[in-house]
Amino acid sequence: MLKRIGLLVAVSLLASGPAAAQDADAQAVLRAAADTMGVTDMMSIRYSGSGWLGRVGQNFAPADDWPRYELAAYERTIDFETNSSREERVVRQGSYAARGGGVPIPGEQRQTLLVRGEHAWNTQIDRVIPMPAVAEQRLLEIFLTPHGFLKGAMAADDAIAVTRNEYGQRVTVVSFIALDRYRINGTITEDHVIERVQTWLPNPVVGDMYYETVYTNYQDVGDGMMFPMNWHQHQDFDDGAHEPNVSGGDHSFGLTTIDDVAVNVDGAALTVPDAVRNATVPPVRVEAEQVAEGVWLMAGGTHHSVAVEFRDSVAVIEAPLNEARSLAVIAEVTRLVPDKPIRYVVTTHHHWDHLGGLRAYVHEGATVVTHVGNRPYYQEVLRARPWLLEPDRFSLFPPEEWSEGYIFETLHEKYILGDHETRLVELHHVQGLAHAAGMLIAYFPQEKLLVEADLYTPPGPGRPAPAAPNASHLSLYRNVQRLGLDVETIVPIHGRPAPWSEFAEFIEGAQ
C-alpha cells in the first residue's frame, strides 16, 4: 500500500482559513471526480500491483533518502462501509542498495496489515498480532487513497475548496478534517481525477510530519472508471533545495505497476478478532538493572538506555522511541541518583527509533554527544518551532541553551566522558558499517563493558543464535579488535546483556 501516512494539523489551525479563499463549490467538484473515478456507487475496492517500499527513518546517513525494498507483490482491499482495509505485501531486497536500517532482508517477507474502524492488527500465518498503537493512522490512511478521499470529503460537512495554477493547469484543492484533527487536502485536476492527497502526522523526531501521495497516469480500467497506474508517496520533506542537504529522507512508497482493479468485491468487510477488540497500548515501563557499580541498563521495553553515574553528574546513553519513554527513564535515573543532574545524552546513531526521545533530554538540560556528521541534522531536529498535533515539552518550553547553541559535543573517532574518581567512558566511531553512518559504541575500560545499538542483539533465553553472522555482527567484532578493547560484557540497546565470549564464539565459529 501507500505506506502509512497521514496529514495532521491541529484542528484549530487546519479548520481556520480566510473565507475569501473558499472560491470553489467543493461538493460540485467532488461529485464530478466521483463520477469520473467510479466512486458514486462504490462500496469497496480491491487493487493489486508491484513497486517499492521505503524504510522511513532508517536512512544510512541523514542526507540520504529512505532505504528501499522491492515490493514484489501488493494487494489492498478497502470496504468503505465499515472502514476496513486489508493490505498484503511481499517484500524483498531486490536490486536496491543494502545500506541503512533493516536491510538487507533475507529472502521474501510476507506482511498482512489490517484495520477496521478503531482496531488494527497484523497476521502471520495463523497468528493474530494486535496493533493498537497504529490503529488511528491505518484508519486515516483509508482517506488518503484517491477513492477514500472522495468518500470522506463528500461525507464531511466542513469541506472547502480553493483553485490555483499548478504544473500548467488549473486545479482545485478540496480540504476537510478527518477523525477530528487531521486536515486532508486533495488536489483535483481539470480532468476530474485526484492528483495528490496530503496531510500531516505526529512524529516524535520531526513533529508534524508531511505525508503525501501523488497519483498519476490515469487509465480507464472498465466501465469508464479512471484509476491511477502510478502511486508515489512521500513521508517527511527532502531538503534538497537547500545546501547542504541535512535531511534527505522522503520517498516512502510507490506502485509502479497496477495489475488488477475490482470494485464491490466480496469479503471486503473485516471481522475484528477477539484478541484485538480489547487490546490497548501498553504503558511505558522502565526496569533498571545494575550491570556494574554506577551503571544501569534501563530496560523494560523494546529499546533500552544506559545510565552512567559520574562524580558530579549522570550521562544517559541512547534516547529511543519517544518523549514518554525518555521522561520515564529520566524519572528512574532521578530516583537512582537523586542528587546529580543528567549532564550528557549520548546518541549511538540517527535512526528515528533511536532518536525519538532526544528532545526530552535537551529540555532537561543535557548536552548532546554525537558523531560530527549528525550535528547538522540534529540541529534541525532540535529547532524550536510549534508542534501542533502532539506538542512535546521542547516545543512548548524551548530551553535557553538551545537558543544560545550550547548543546553539542561532537567527535570524529574518539571522545572520553567521565572523571578519574569514578569512571571513564570511551566513545568510538564504528568504521566500515552499512547500517548507519556515524555509529558510536561506548566502552567502559574499568568495567570492561561495551554498549552497542543494532549491531548485535543477543538471543533470549532458550532461543538459538542466528544461523550465521551478518554484516553488522562482523563490523562490531572487527572494530573491537581494531581498537584493542578488552570487553567482558556486551550491554545492548536491544536484548539482554551477554558475555563477549558468547558473541566471539558465534563469530569465530562461522569463520
Image: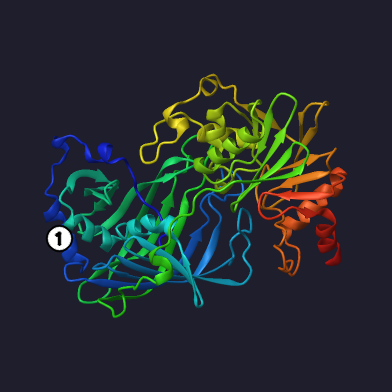
Which three-letter amino acid code belongs to the residue tagged 1? Ala
- Residue nearest the viewer, comparing 352 with 339: 339
Neighbourhood count class around disc 1 (C-alpha, 10 Å): few under 14, some 14–19, many 20 upward: some
Where residue 22 sits, quadrant-wise, is top left
Give the percent coordinates (x, y) of residue 323: 50, 40
Count of marks overlaid on the render: 1
19 shown above or below 121: above
Residue beneath disc 1: 32
- Name which residue lies at 57% across and 51% down: 58
- Name the outermost residue toward the bottom: 266
Give the percent coordinates (x, y) of residue 358: 56, 37
501 shown above or below 394: below
Give the percent coordinates (x, y) of residue 300: 61, 51
**The C terminus lies in quadrant:** bottom right
Residue 495 visible to the viewer? yes
Where residue 255 sits, quadrant-wise, is bottom left
190 shown above or below 105: above
Asked if residue 384 lies left or right of residue 460, the reply is: left
- Residue nearest the viewer, comparing 10 with 272: 272
- Residue nearest the viewer, comparing 320 with 469: 320
Asked if residue 337 lies left or right of residue 423, the reply is: left
- Residue nearest the viewer, comparing 353 with 1: 353
Query: Of helix, strand and loop, which one carries label 1?
Result: helix
Residue 243 visible to the viewer? no
Where residue 46 sits, quadrant-wise, is bottom left
**The N terminus lies in quadrant:** bottom left
Give the percent coordinates (x, y) of residue 202: 41, 45
Image color mode: rainbow
